Image (cartoon, rainbow, N blue to C red):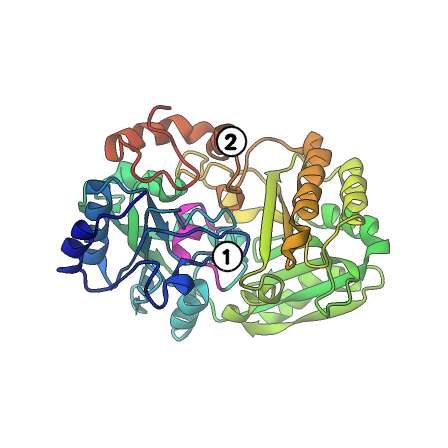
């Protein structure tokens, strides 16, 4: 796509943010996203400061016939925040956060990440479900569902959204909530960036200052016992405790393979100590690093494993269970993993997140059970082929154990339309209806796309 300079000059007369083309300083930094595997070059980057800038950018891109991408935190592994040759609407400068401690709500702009959001709410002893990596943007995570460390107590991020300020394909600014534009509000809570540009989000908050969290790691030789114990332990775990389990590499760079629990307990320390004792005392762990910490800290525990610029290729699926066959296959595959950064994580769904009706929001995956993430990650571009092949082969080897359904935030950039439909499941047809009403020309298609043609 070519950029018409006359149209760009017209945009510049009202735009209060920064407009960048390939010749401008800062262009290369602005076009980059978290996943180093993505290397795209937008024709124009519109770095917005507020909602009016988003409106101008959407109108400009639509009228000029440019492909539009939307960058919030830029953390999504698919790299769909960047277009090649088109217009990237960049919200990363929009960092406003307002917390109302009396109402227990917060309003945050679309460029905020969870580290920034958690810092602001923690000043008032408040928090909400918000991812597992602190550098993740609030916008992309929330629009796709938003799992996190306290979802068993408070539900997903989408379950805590009160309203969204949304710029639609025709340049309108809409407040979407249960009271205003409720069909669009429903669709935005799980339907990703298909329906417009989310300028800001209003969340319900919960009283939460301190949690008990950390890691418990075992050598890979004990992985079979660890995963079988995890299966038994999570059968009746309480709402206050979230436990993920992973086959991972040691963070010291040694390349040692481990089977690890990552835990977060929102109850008082004495209750947490009782609930966590079986995990801490099981087997002969190589490491037990669990303690009381501020809630924002637990969101940083895995940050070191996902550095900006690392090359990422992911696959994921919800599981029918943790059968012995699944466990043995997963361990066997992980033993052949070519990168000392790659991991396989089991995210347990229980508690509040599973009590919400599957059609209450556009995030339909409300069954108790496990989500598997195969997170391929490496630094050397020359090893890309072998690393992506390992992820694909591991995914195929484990496919007999999938129950159907995918978490849209983990989909890659090479997924089929069937994978997208699997992510939305029973709500897909309703999402198509909303897409037809608000974006019939599919202006916002650089996402895990809901085709208005069905």
Residue 293 in sight from this viewpoint: yes
The quarter of the image holding the N terminus is top left
Label 2 sits on residue: 416
Q: Nearer the viewer, residue 271 or 54?
A: 54
Residue 417, placed above or below residue 213: above
Q: Position of residue 291 (x, y in %)?
A: 64, 73
Residue 111 falls left or right of residue 255: left
Q: Residue at x 66, y 39 (%)?
A: 392
Q: Nearer the viewer, residue 54 or 159?
A: 54
- The range drawn in magenta is 135-146
Q: Position of residue 102 (x, y in %)?
A: 30, 68
Task: Determine the image quadrant of residue 445.
Answer: top left
Which label belongs to residue 131? 1
In the orientation shown, which residue stands out farthest toward the top? Answer: 454
Residue 179, placed above or below residue 259: above
Residue 265 falls left or right of residue 91: right
Query: Residue 140 magenta-drawn?
Result: yes
Residue 175 in sight from this viewpoint: no
> Which structural element holds mark 1?
loop
């Amino acid at each position: 796509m070519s950029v018409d300079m006359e149209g760009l000059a017209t945009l510049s007369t009202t735009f209060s943010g920064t407009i960048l083309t390939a010749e401008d300083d800062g262009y290369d930094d602005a076009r980059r996203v978290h996943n180093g595997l993505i290397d795209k070059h937008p024709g124009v980057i519109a770095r917005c400061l507020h909602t009016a800038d988003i409106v101008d950018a959407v109108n400009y891109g639509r009228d000029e016939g440019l492909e539009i991408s939307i960058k919030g935190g830029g953390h999504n592994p698919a790299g769909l925040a960047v277009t090649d040759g088109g217009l990237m609407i960049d919200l990363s400068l929009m960092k406003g956060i307002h917390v109302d401690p009396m109402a227990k709500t917060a309003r945050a702009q679309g460029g905020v990440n969870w580290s920034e959001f958690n810092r602001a709410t923690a000043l008032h002893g408040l928090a909400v479900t918000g991812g597992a990596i602190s550098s993740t943007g609030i916008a992309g995570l929330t629009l796709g569902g938003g799992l996190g460390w306290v979802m068993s107590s408070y539900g997903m991020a989408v379950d805590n959204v009160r309203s969204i300020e949304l710029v639609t394909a025709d340049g309108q600014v809409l407040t979407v909530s249960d009271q205003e534009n409720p069909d669009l509000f429903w669709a935005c809570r799980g339907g990703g960036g298909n329906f417009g540009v989310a300028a800001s989000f209003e969340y319900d908050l919960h009283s939460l200052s301190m949690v008990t969290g950390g890691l418990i790691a075992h050598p890979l030789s004990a992985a079979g016992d660890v995963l079988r114990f995890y299966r038994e332990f999570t059968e009746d775990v309480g709402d206050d405790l979230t436990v993920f389990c992973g086959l991972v590499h040691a963070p010291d760079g040694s390349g040692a393979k481990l089977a690890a629990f990552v835990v977060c307990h929102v109850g008082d320390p004495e209750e947490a100590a009782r609930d966590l004792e079986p995990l801490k005392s099981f087997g002969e762990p190589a490491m037990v690093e669990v303690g009381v910490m501020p809630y924002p800290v637990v969101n940083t525990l895995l940050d070191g494993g996902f550095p900006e610029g690392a090359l990422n290729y992911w696959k994921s699926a919800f599981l029918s269970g943790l059968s012995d066959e699944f466990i043995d296959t997963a361990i066997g595959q992980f033993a052949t993993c070519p990168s000392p950064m790659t991991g396989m994580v089991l995210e347990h769904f229980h508690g509040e997140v599973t009590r919400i009706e599957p059609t209450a929001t556009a995030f339909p995956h409300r069954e108790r059970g496990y989500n598997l993430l195969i997170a391929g990650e490496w630094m050397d571009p020359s090893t890309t082929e072998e690393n992506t092949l390992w992820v694909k082969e591991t995914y195929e080897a484990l496919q007999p154990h999938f129950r159907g359904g995918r978490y849209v935030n983990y989909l890659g950039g090479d997924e089929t339309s069937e994978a997208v439909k699997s992510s939305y499941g029973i709500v897909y047809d309703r999402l198509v209806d909303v897409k037809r009403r608000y974006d019939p020309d599919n202006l916002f298609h650089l996402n895990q796309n809901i085709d208005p043609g069905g």
